[in-house]
Amino acid sequence: MHPYTLHLPTRLVFGEGAIEKLPELTKDFGKKVLIVMGGGSVKRNGILGRARELLRDRRIFELSGVEPNPRISTIRKGVEICKKEGIEWLLPIGAGSVIDSAKAIAAGAFYEGDAWGLVLDSSKIKKALPIFVVLTNAATGSEYDDSGVISNLETDEKLPIGSPLLAPVASIMDPAYTCTVPPKHTAAGAADIFSHTIEQYIVADGNILTDAMCEGMLKTVIECTPRVLKNPNDLDARGQLMMASSFGCCGLLTIGRTPTPWPCHAIEHEISAWHDITHGEGLAVITPHWMRWSLTEKTAPRLAQYGVRIFGLDPRAPAMENAEKAIEKTSGFFRSIGIPATLSELGVTDEHFEAMADHVLSHWWPLSGAFRPLDREGILAILRASL
């Protein structure tokens, strides 16, 4: 079994009405709070109003308009507010993009240079403001990890930022707050959870415990996503997807396994950097094509195991046959929840594929450690097959 280190400092507060604990959770963290949010949904559904009421004894500042692929230009605005007003803690109310923005703002508040410098080199993060989260969609897992992803439209880059200092102090998770998420974003969030799990499950060496964890995560997404798309008010299914979101990207699924360089995320980040598509949709397109490219006689047994345990394929069938069927069933699941099957349907062309491949190799973790070692030609092959 591979060595591992795991530290999960964030407190998860789950359940209907969990936001009522916000005053108690934050009572020792100061009076000046910056609420970070996206569009107007948290205003329309009453979440923002309730947070304001609960924090009526604090001095509240607001930053709205965070984009689905959060931009450094918005982070700069948040940093400016923090420095000017002496903000003491942050309250992102929203999904992954809002939380990621808050993380970058939290670090930028103590950095003398431009916040993009912290994205390019997260080792420069020496201090950060405390973060408390009110989650509104099950997707990225940013509510329970110490990293985020930020886009720079000036350079066509979408890169990770991460530091142990960026883990939220606490994340409040009420499944009722996800009921008004549109079907498109519900499905994209589920695809994101699915991809997080696959990236950690489909590796050379697993182990009994984390194989079972990954398989439980995948089964949860496959079972619960159709339920919430059919009945948006299914709180049990919503809650299970929230749980899967949190545990999908916190490091728990990686323990004792072959380290993963997250090849699907490496490729998708380039696509959404150039085309600003929805992250989960891009992952849903890329993931089956990465599987197909990775399938060899050597890798077939792991993909076959996936097919047998997740989709109930015949364990007596040849590994290659089950692996190929598992890949088709993966594509079929994404189509069944309404996600486009090709990049072309998302408005992506091959115009920047060469630049994307070069940027992956120069800015991402080494892909030589992927399930099947991935080079420039492999990246291009996956991109072209995904069109």
Image: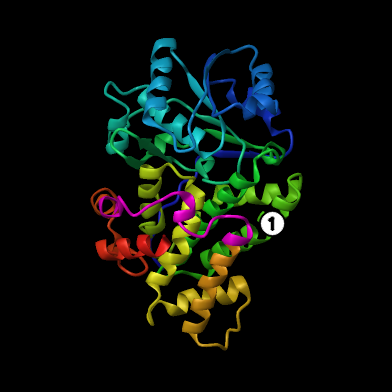
* 201 relative to 35, above or below: below
Residue 308 on image: x %, y %: 58, 77
Q: Which residue is mark 1?
A: 226
Residue 340 occupies quadrant: bottom right
Front residue (pair 384, 122): 384
Residue 2 on image: x %, y %: 38, 65
144 in magenta? no
Quadrant in which the C terminus is drawn? bottom left
* 111 relative to 140, above or below: above
- Name the residue rendered at 50%, 29% in the picture: 131
Question: Badge 1 local density, few (<14 within 10 Å), some, or many (20+)?
Answer: some
Query: Where does the magenta region start and end?
Result: 334-356
Q: Amino acid at mark 1?
A: Pro
Residue 233 occupies quadrant: top right
Residue 294 on image: x %, y %: 38, 71
353 in magenta? yes
